[in-house]
Image: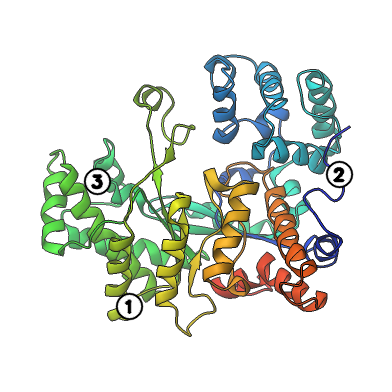
Amino acid sequence: MSYIKENFLLTTKTAEKLYYEYASDMPIFDYHCHLPEKAILENKQFSDLYEIWLSGDHYKWRLMRNYGVDEEYITGGASNKEKFLAYCRTLGTAFGNPLYHWSQVELETFFGCTLEINEKNAEAIWEQCNAYIKENNVTPQSLIEGSNVKYLCTTNEIFDDLSTFEEIEKKNYGFKVYPAFRADKIMNIEADAYLTFVSKLGDIKCLNCLERRIEERLKEFIAHGTVATDIALQKVYPVADKADAAKVFASRLEGNPVSNEEQEIFKGYLTYFLFKLYAKYDLATELHIGAMRNNNAVMLKKLGLDTGYDSIAEDNSIANMSRLFDRLNNEGSLPKTIVFNLNPKMNTEIMTLIGSFQDGIAKGKMQFGPAWWFLDNKVGMENHLRDLTATGHIGAFVGMLTDSRSFLSYPRHHYFRRILCAYFGEMMEKGEMTSDIEFVGNVVKDICINNVVEYLGVKKDG
């Protein structure tokens, strides 16, 4: 039997009451994820447990590598069953890792399987869950709707085909799918494939041409329901002059490589341009910082991007972030912004900085985003809540997301909700905050979904 019990992570009676009476039944708005919209549209039944659970999930791949599993059984030529058995063998001793919790919860939530995940039970889990998939026609739609998801934002590059979202809308699913606008591949000027990416936008001959095309594409995204945008940077760069950025871009269009200094000039200017553009159209900006990507050149060449070879960067760009926000604020062009920070050493620095740029256009206009990626675990969430409540305002918080490529990731919202209720419950029982359970419960509901619906301007009727 699974070690996950009914009151998992709920450390007090007050926490239990908050979770079961106010949090557990609240719908989900997954406002940042990497689910493939084409799979949502096609809505095909999954073939087996590997396809639905392990395929494309670099969180699990990374854990297996840490346990010494050969790549053959992770992304290599081993069978789906062999890869699944290797994961169960890995997970059995991964105590304290979030996957140790998440996977067990996913198994019971989506397949009704209460066997504890380990090497001994792996064969039985494989057979039981595969039978369940076949008998119950498990598809992306059934998983999303079964998780009580009402809205989700996929993450789409600037040149992605948006017709898929038109076709999804025609399906009349019980949830809405919105494309979040991302221009990273146009920003990362040093990439080998950069000219190929730019060419997908048409005949771009100068920086002015690029800016016009970015805005045109953004308007097309908005027409397809876009309410959020995304920028991912290792660090925030100084805002450069447009003329200098134009020279760098022109040189790159001629096929020349770019130096580190030139990269920073271009990225610094384009970040500023994008923020202004998003403010113009009243779109929230999700700024992800602190990830040092593609550390392993051998595996990057072999497997490509987003395969589990990134880490936390130590860059401290808080001064550059301050200058960026201040300049935009002076120009009346600072959009609603959610800052996702991957380096926990910078939590309070970022939290106190964004508090300097709040105003009345939105509750919590400048948001300290939830614990993300390597911090998306029990310790990371608890630290995030402590830092947020100590220097900000928890009542304005827009809550959790999955940041996932897996259709089974929605229990992560409930993982967070349990931790949130435990956090409030302990303070309430210690007499450190109001004991009005209904009042606090309504704040919990706001953090679960109401705040982010209001923040992104989504109509509740869809």
Q: Residue at x 64, y 16 (%)?
A: 79
Instruction: Indicate the amino acid at tag 1.
Output: Asn
Q: Position of residue 210 (x, y in %)?
A: 24, 58
Write down the quadrant of residue 110 in the picture: top right
Residue 191 location, x and y as percent?
A: 27, 39
- Say which mark, if any, is on residue 113: none
Residue type at mark 3: give it: Ile
The structure residue drawn at horizontal position 56% and vertical position 68%, both measured from the top left corner, is: 390
Q: Closer to the observer: label 1 or label 2?
A: 2
Residue identified by numbered label 1: 329
Mark 1 secondary-structure assignment: helix
Q: Is residue 125 above or below residue 244?
A: above
Image quarter in which the N terminus is found: top right
Picture colour scheme: rainbow
Give residue 15's position: percent from left, percent from top. 80, 61
Q: Residue at x 21, y 51 (%)?
A: 264
Mark 2: few/some/many CA within 10 Å (<14, 14-19, 20+): few
The CA distance from mark 1 to mark 3 is: 27 Å
Q: Residue furthest bottom?
A: 360
- Tell which tag, 1 or 3, sits nearer the viewer: 1
For the question of whether residue 433 can be seen, the reply is yes
Quick one: label 3, few (<14), some, or many (20+) residues within 10 Å?
Answer: many
Q: Position of residue 97 (x, y in %)?
A: 64, 36
Inspect this view and state whether residue 457 appears.
Answer: no
The residue that label 2 is drawn on is: 5
